[in-house]
Amino acid sequence: MVSQASDAVVQEVGEGARTSAHPLLRTESLTKDYPGIRALNEMNFDLRSGEVHILFGENGAGKSTLISMLAGANHPTSGKILFDGKEVHLGSVHEARELGISAVFQEFSLIPQMTVAENMFLGAEPTQGGFLRPREQKAKAEEILKNLDFHLKPGRRVDHLTRAEQQMVEIAKAFRTDPSVLILDEPTASLTNHETEQLFKLVAKLRKRGVGIIYITHRMAEIREIGDRITILRDGRFIDTVDAATTSEDRLVELMTGRVVGQIFPKVNYNPGETILEVDNLHTPGSGGLNGASAFVRRGEIVGFAGLVGSGKSKFAQASFGSYPIESGRIRFKGQDVGKPKTRDMLKRGFMYLPSDRRSDGLMMMRPARENISLASLTNAPLSAGLFLNTRAENRVASELADRLNLSPRRIERLAGQFSGGNQQKLMLARSLTREFDLIVFDEPTVGVDVGTRAAIYQFIAELSENGAAILLISSDLPEILHLTNRTYVFYRGEIQAELAGDDITEANVLAHFFEREEV
């Protein structure tokens, strides 16, 4: 079965059935209820052979609920799922995969202490006579990775991989069998441009074979590049299915939100003031560490950090905040030398860092939204009442911020892990509003969030800057760097290749420094 899957990845056949009228997968009145909330309401959806069908909607619209049931990870309250014209009852992800439905979820399901190959074949290990065959497993993993053009070693432990590499492992897991339906949930969120191009080439090959692909993304450019049809959901309900090639972005946003959303990027009035963070000649340990990087951030400006995944842009902020070790270098915060910073001390000083990986680093997934919002300000008024927590004030602050950021659902006692990815991002953003911070670092702030929320986050960042906060924006999304920052540092292999300002922050100038300079 695996060899068939590997062959399928590279098999070039005719144009296939991209517009086949035969529904490969269909739902009828599919409904999912949770205590006190209907997450999906009588959803009718169909997927044709050889098409890329985009699911589009705001965070909490029901997209993840729908694909979790199609992938066997969740079970409907009512309604039907039909595969190849026959009703099916998917009891588990394993059952769905054996049937031909494979999913790559936005939140990873990898075991960090296991290798790439072990994760790829977890639960489906090759055996003979009751014994594992690790050499065969490794060989099959190598074959799949090679055909996917993913440069990973099967024997590497997952906890030694970057987030982008972990994303590749998740994708590779889907190809240990030969899928008829492939579900991709924000698959490019952690990938570089090159890796994204490789994924799109793979998608093109699969659609030629007649594989139906359900694709969730909030990136308009991706919809235009690979989408055939788009189904829009809002508040757990089906809104419309439209043609990807002929439907305008404004129309999509209007269908998604129920309202007209104006310009995505706000006009930012920059008024740089005193220097808040000044870092000189920063070095961090390890082969992928920083090598003499220097930068500064002033009050009233938005400074961008751009570069490829693994270039050092996030490590610079983490080291300055105290969450990553430092070998040498000088760090000054609000005019005072810090030495080797510690996170608790930096928070007290007025430095807030919001990490890119909300599940692993940013949130307490098994604690309520209220606690996640108030976490960084428990010792400050109005939350602090001497030695005790003012729970009434905590509830009030958390509720006000949930309303302000349009948390969906607005249940501050709901566990963080029960919210959609975009709403988890809102919980982290709300944390930066519980008190005044002098410097706020936003590390990939719009990963997995919808267009409406993205516009709100940009406006939120602009307002903080205009009110006098120093903002550091770390982003792999080039338009964010181009439209929001008034100074940008470009990182490459732990070094800063360029500092650009004002009109010099162009796509050509930024990309020119993404790679090693040629010797003249």
Image (cartoon, grey):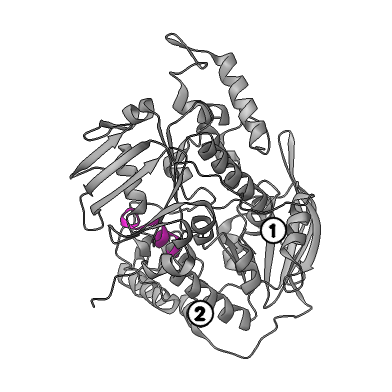
Mark drawn on residue 56:
1
Q: Quadrant of residue 297?
A: top left
Q: Is residue 29 visible?
A: no
Q: Which residues are magenta?
A: 158-168
| Left or right of 1 in this view: 15 | right
How many numbered marks have been drawn onto this rendered protein structure? 2
In the image, what residue type sits under mark 1?
Phe
- The answer to whether 204 is drawn above or below residue 137 in the figure is below
Above/below status of 144 relative to 216: below
For this view, does 450 lie left or right of residue 309? right
Q: Nearer the viewer, residue 358 or 300?
A: 300
Taking the magenta stretch, the answer to whether it contains residue 512 is no
- Residue at image coords 51%, 17%: 383
What is the secondary structure assignment of the residue under circle 2? helix
Give the class, few, some or many, for how many residues have Cα within 10 Å of label 2's Cα (few <14, many ≥20): many
Query: Is 376 located above or below residue 487 in the figure?
Result: above
Residue, x 25% and y 39% (percent of image)? 331
| Residue 152 x %, y % | 34, 68
